[in-house]
Amino acid sequence: MPNVYDYLDRVRRCPGMFFDLRAGPDEQLFRLEANLQGYSSALLLHGIDEPGARFLVEFAWYLYSTRGWSGSNGAIRAILEHSGTADEAWEEFWRLVAEYRDAESPRFQDVDSDEDA
């Protein structure tokens, strides 16, 4: 069953399918955050038990617990505030997601990933 990381992998591979590439990387990150909020809301509304249902909240907590970055305005804002440029924030987001995914991997060991779906 696909999960939040399958979605994120698709966005990273081909952001132009999800966002207007004329928008800057900071705007793309905010749009991605809105998409993830919708993703989480849909899972919770329909009672779908997927470990990524609280991805944004848990990712922000991870950034706080590992770096001391405030997540009160969300993980995206924290990453933007701690990056030199929006382009650097885009790259840092993906690096941190990979790091978080590795740290959280036991939660996903029983989730079937279907990257081709």
Image: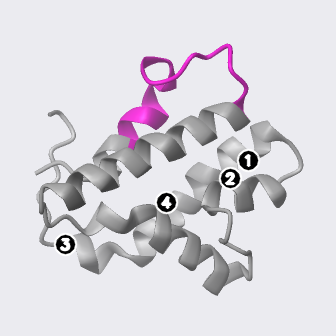
Read off the residue under disc 3: 109
Depth order, front residue of 82/99: 82
Position of residue 25 in the picture relative to residue 102 (left or right): right
Screen quadrant of the C terminus: top left
Q: How is the image coloured?
A: one colour
- x and y percentages locating residue 17 in the rendered image: 42, 19
**Dot 4 or dot 2, earlier in sequence:** 2
Apparent side of residue 73 relative to residue 112 in the rendered image (left or right): right
| SS type, badge 2 | helix
Q: Which callout, 3 or 2, points at the residue further toward the start of the chain?
A: 2
Residue on which the image places disc 2: 92
Left or right of 115, for residue 10: right
Q: Position of residue 32 (x, y in %)?
A: 51, 40
In this view, 32 is above or below 23 = below
Q: Is residue 75 left or right of residue 59?
A: right
Cα distance in 3D space between marks 2 and 1: 5 Å
Task: Say which amino acid is labelled 3.
Answer: Gln
Kind of residue at badge 1: Ala
- Disc 2 residue type? Glu
Q: Count of labels shown?
A: 4
Query: Do the numbered discs 2 and 1 sit on residues whose CB atoms are within 8 Å?
Result: yes
Label placed on residue 39? none
> Which amino acid does the dot numbered 4 rest on?
Ala
User: Mark 1 = which residue?
Assistant: 89
